[in-house]
Image: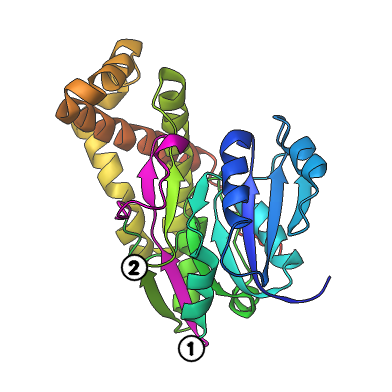
């Protein structure tokens, strides 16, 4: 395959409805000189059949038969990429038509950039509207977040890609960001450029429990992250705060009660402050739970597939 200017790398796992919107948005860009690398992390929802039946010329599809996690998938994408510029997004992100053009235009200004784009979090695909005034509500500043970010491939190769420590979720993108910062790259933030929507999905009892599990995995990864980076890592991971608040409110005794979980869900609309307070405590609790589990399984190593 011939060289292209950019490679958009997307890991996905069982997100077919929103993945379709993600792909179709990328196929409707204002520029052509890019490829889409889709890494299917063992989906069982028809993702493979959709891609193979559609036969998109711009999409290069790779499938993992066993789940490896999004950062392993991104490393594979980096290996396979033909573009000089790598753009990372998630499969639940829907981008504006000038998204790729914006990223490339900024990189044309100088050679040593990391372009961190922002997103607007919304619940459903019905809320995607490219014509209304756009204001991001997730400001990813002073960090490296893979839901919308780009840089030259050579820098990813230079630092060895994503290191695979702890559970599959959490802190591997920030860990990579630290190593890129040590190369003295310049960060540029896209507020009114590189625009995208992040589709969170509607909150339900099942999805809320999924969020709790995600926080627990992130807590375990945070433990390894701080072990590696010390105080520099603690400023981002805030493991001490999670431990403190979990103990202060004795969350082990009550936060996992089914009635409390239902209260968090039911108070989301009518009593937002109550829900926000309880969700905040739940986040500290599950992060601390992950930290405690990581301490029990102390042995770990850092590895990369790049």
Residue 155 in the image: above or below residue 126? below
Alpha carbon of mark 2 to alpha carbon of mark 1: how far? 19 Å
The x, y position of residue 154, in whole percent, is 64, 79
Q: Is residue 142 left or right of residue 47?
A: left
Graded by Cα atoms within 10 Å as few (under 14), some (14 to 19) or many (20 or more), the crowding at tag 1 reads few
Query: Which quadrant would residue 168 be assigned to in this image?
Result: top right
- Residue extending furthest toward the right: 1
Name the image quarter holding the C terminus: bottom right
Q: Which residue is mark 2?
A: 142
Q: Identify the residue shown where x is 53% and y is 71%.
A: 101
Is residue 21 found inside the magenta-colored segment of the image?
A: no
Q: Is residue 92 left or right of residue 252?
A: right
Res 216 seen here: no
Q: Which residue is mark 1?
A: 110
Is residue 128 found inside the magenta-colored segment of the image?
A: yes
Magenta span: chief secondary structure: loop
Residue 90 in the image: above or below residue 174? above
Query: Which quadrant would residue 153 be assigned to in this image?
Result: bottom right
SS class, disc 1: loop
Q: Earlier in the sequence, mark 2 or mark 1?
A: 1
- Residue extending furthest toward the top: 259
Q: Identify the residue shown where x is 81% and y is 40%.
A: 53
Residue range (magenta): 109-138
Q: How is the image coloured?
A: rainbow
């Amino acid at each position: 395959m011939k060289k292209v200017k950019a490679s958009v790398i997307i890991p996905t796992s069982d997100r077919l409805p929103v993945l379709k919107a993600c792909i179709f948005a990328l196929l409707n860009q204002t520029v052509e000189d890019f490829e889409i690398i889709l890494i299917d992390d063992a989906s069982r929802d028809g993702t493979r059949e959709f891609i193979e039946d559609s036969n998109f010329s711009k999409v290069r599809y790779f499938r993992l038969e066993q789940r490896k996690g999004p950062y392993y998938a991104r490393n594979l994408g980096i290996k396979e990429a033909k573009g000089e510029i790598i753009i990372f997004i998630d499969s639940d992100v829907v981008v504006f038509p000038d998204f790729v053009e914006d990223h490339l235009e900024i990189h044309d200004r100088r050679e040593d950039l990391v372009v961190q784009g922002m997103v607007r979090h919304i619940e459903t695909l019905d809320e995607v509207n490219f014509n209304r005034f756009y204001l991001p509500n997730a400001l990813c500043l002073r960090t490296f977040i893979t839901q919308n970010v780009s840089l030259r491939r050579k820098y990813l190769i230079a630092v060895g890609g994503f290191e695979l420590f702890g559970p599959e979720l959490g802190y591997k993108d920030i860990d990579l960001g630290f190593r890129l910062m040590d190369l003295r790259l310049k960060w540029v933030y896209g507020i009114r450029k590189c625009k995208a929507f992040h589709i969170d999905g509607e909150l339900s009892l099942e999805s809320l429990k999924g969020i709790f599990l995600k926080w627990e995995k992130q807590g375990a990864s945070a433990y390894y992250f701080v072990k590696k980076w010390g105080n520099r890592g603690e400023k981002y991971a805030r493991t001490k705060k999670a431990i403190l608040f979990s103990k202060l409110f004795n969350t082990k005794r009550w936060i996992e009660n089914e009635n409390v979980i239902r209260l968090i869900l039911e108070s989301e609309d009518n009593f937002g402050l109550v829900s926000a307070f309880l969700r905040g405590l739940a986040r500290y609790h599950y992060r601390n739970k992950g930290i405690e589990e990581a301490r029990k399984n102390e042995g770990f190593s850092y590895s990369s597939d790049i």
